[in-house]
Image (spheres, helix red, strand yellow):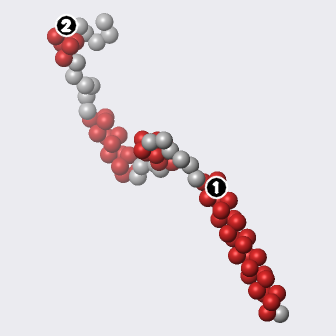
Amino acid sequence: MEPESHRLEQRQTESTAAFEQSLQRTNTREFGSVEEVLREDRARTPPPAALAHRVAERIRQTGPPPRPWWARWLGRREGE
């Protein structure tokens, strides 16, 4: 009885090891730069609700950006 349980345990260990290796192969991804890693993380991880609310409120409160210096200097209006 002892050898059979040992064989069963060995098979389970081998099966688990093979499963973990297959998971590592499917979930492994190489990135060319840090920016790609950050983009991937941003796409997969939503911000906390409180933070998203604060950012949305701040964006709503800020007005449009000032006209660029060159547009003021040349006297051009936006959309011309």
**How many neighbours does mark 2 have within 10 angstroms: few (below 14), some (14-19), or many (20 or more)?**
few
Q: Nearer the viewer, residue 30 or 43?
A: 30
> Is 41 on the left-hand or right-hand side of 12?
left
Tag 1: amino acid: Arg
Q: Quadrant of the C terminus?
A: top left
Vertical comparison of 24 with 57: above or below:
below
Residue at the disc numbered 2: 74
Instruction: Where is residue 68? Give x, y as percent.
Output: 22, 18
Element type at mark 1: helix
Q: Nearer the viewer, mark 1 or mark 2?
A: 1
Q: Nearer the viewer, residue 19 or 71?
A: 19
> Is 3 on the left-hand or right-hand side of 53?
right
Question: Residue at 74% of width from left, 79% of height from top?
Answer: 10
Element type at mark 2: helix
> Is 50 on the left-hand or right-hand side of 19?
left
Q: Quadrant of the N terminus?
A: bottom right
Instruction: Where is residue 12? Give x, y as percent.
Output: 73, 76
Instruction: Where is residue 30? Give x, y as percent.
Output: 53, 47
Instruction: Where is residue 38? Give x, y as percent.
Output: 43, 45
Tag 2: amino acid: Leu
Q: CA distance from mark 1 to mark 2?
A: 58 Å
**How many neighbours does mark 1 have within 10 angstroms: few (below 14), some (14-19), or many (20 or more)?**
few
Vertical comparison of 65 with 55: above or below:
above
Residue at the outermost bottom position = 1
Marks 1 and 2, the one that precedes in the sequence: 1
Q: Inspect this view and state whether residue 39 appears.
A: no
> Is 26 on the left-hand or right-hand side of 75?
right
Q: Quadrant of residue 25?
A: bottom right
Q: Quadrant of residue 9?
A: bottom right
Residue at the disc numbered 1: 25
Residue at the outermost left position = 73
